[in-house]
Image: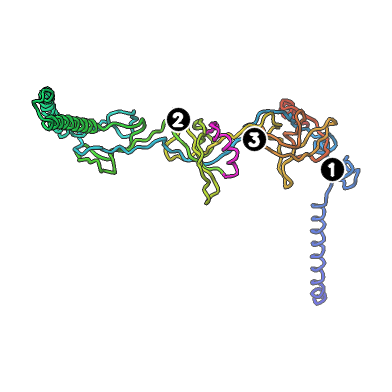
Amino acid sequence: MTLSTAKTSPSLRKKILLLILVIIVALLIWRFWPHGSAGPQGAGGPPGGGRAHGGPGGMMMSGPTPVHAGEVTTADVPVYLTALGTVIPNATVTVTSRVDGQLMKVYFTEGQKVEAGQLLAQIDPRSYQATLAQYQGDLNQNQAQLKSAELTLSRYRKLFAQDSLSRQDLDTQIATVGQYRGAIKAEQAQIDAAKLNIDFARVTSPISGRAGLRLVDAGNMVHSTDTTGIVTITQTQPAAVTFSVPQSNISTLVRALHNGQSLPATAFDQDGSKELAQGRVQFISNQIDTSTGTVELKALFDNQDEALYPNQFVNLRLQTGTLNQATVIPAQALQLSSDGSFVYVINKDQTVSRKAVKTGPALGDTQQSILEGVTAGEQVVTEGIDRLSDGSKVSVVTASETKAASGKPKAQ
């Protein structure tokens, strides 16, 4: 009996394990098997399974697409040419001494705005004043000698008329008078030169502008041969901007600038976001730079607020002409593709047609001129373009309608 029980125990254990395994599999199948109706009529589900809920997407596909539209109009569109320019002073002068001497005093402050003729420095003038006094003394002496010689000449003429004086003595006296007159003229010239040197000892500004850093301190000797100078004056009112444009624009520029006209120009900061000054282009170079294929121009700006600073980089916008009564569309309507620019035009039957367009210059940030493709009076799609194709049915809504619709509570 004991031997029979020992032989049947392993078989019983296998059956128990197999039963447990079957129960586990059944539980898993029951847990993960969907309990909803899989059939087309189960739980009120509509035919189609995955499209059980007819949301807004299904309704939009069957009805017209809401879009915003803008009108094609006409306007005068300025044609601009942009370039990178450099601000240069209208004039730059290195003020140097025109005489030799000790620099006695400096009358300007570094960075100060100075006017033409304003006293900048004083050089010791005493040596030139002494020279002037010497020349004036020599002049007085020669004037006295001239007067004496003229009186003698007058007597000689009377004696010669009475045949009491030889012709040789008369000619000699005439020459003496001429000699004294020449000496007086030489002395007068020396006096004028001495006065000029005294005037040069007062160093004045030759132009109006901004004074730079002082290059020589008071007490130093300065000479007329010095190249460093005392100070540099830069004229920033007006200021100039030099820039280069491609040679393909020369014909347009020459027609205006060589006929005495000027072209409006606007200077912007380095980022191109802030307007700095308004001016005009009046000068064009007389040759093309063969290394770059460009021609250089110069624009002048009043620069009353000194917004333009020497050697500053600016973006220059030059108006070269105007497109009169050009076709204009809202900038939002213009789209780009691999085939070029296009717009969606709204037809009378509320469908759209995709039309290729040829663009012109922009009119500000909100409008774009069109050279070919649309005509004034048409309507173009400005918003909702990404949901359209050629021939799509659309419904034009206003911004207020869109705002009102977005404010309504969604249906539960």
Residue on which the image places disc 2: 303
Give the Cα distance between marks 2 and 1. 69 Å
Q: Identify which amino acid the numbered label 1 is placed on.
A: Arg
User: Mark 2 or mark 3, which has the lower sequence index?
Assistant: 2
Residue 42, label in figure: none
Q: Locate the C terminus by quadrant.
A: top right
Q: Is residue 216 above or below residue 378?
A: below
What is the x, y in percent for residue 131? 15, 33
Q: Is residue 111 visible?
A: yes
Q: Is residue 122 visible?
A: no
What is the x, y in percent for residue 122? 22, 32
The residue depicted at 80 percent of the width and 34 percent of the height is: 65
Q: In the visual, does 262 lie left or right of 21?
A: left
Q: Locate the N terminus by quadrant.
A: bottom right
User: Mark 2 or mark 1, which has the lower sequence index?
Assistant: 1
Crowding near pointer 1: few (<14 within 10 Å), some, many (20+)? few
Residue 256 drawn in magenta: yes
User: Mark 1 or mark 3, which has the lower sequence index?
Assistant: 1
Residue 362, label in figure: 3
Residue on which the image places disc 1: 51
**Which residue range is magenta in the image?**
246-266
Residue furthest to the front: 163
Front position in the image: 38 or 157:
157
What is the x, y in percent for residue 214? 28, 38
Q: In the visual, does 243 lie left or right of 123?
A: right
Residue furthest to the bottom: 3
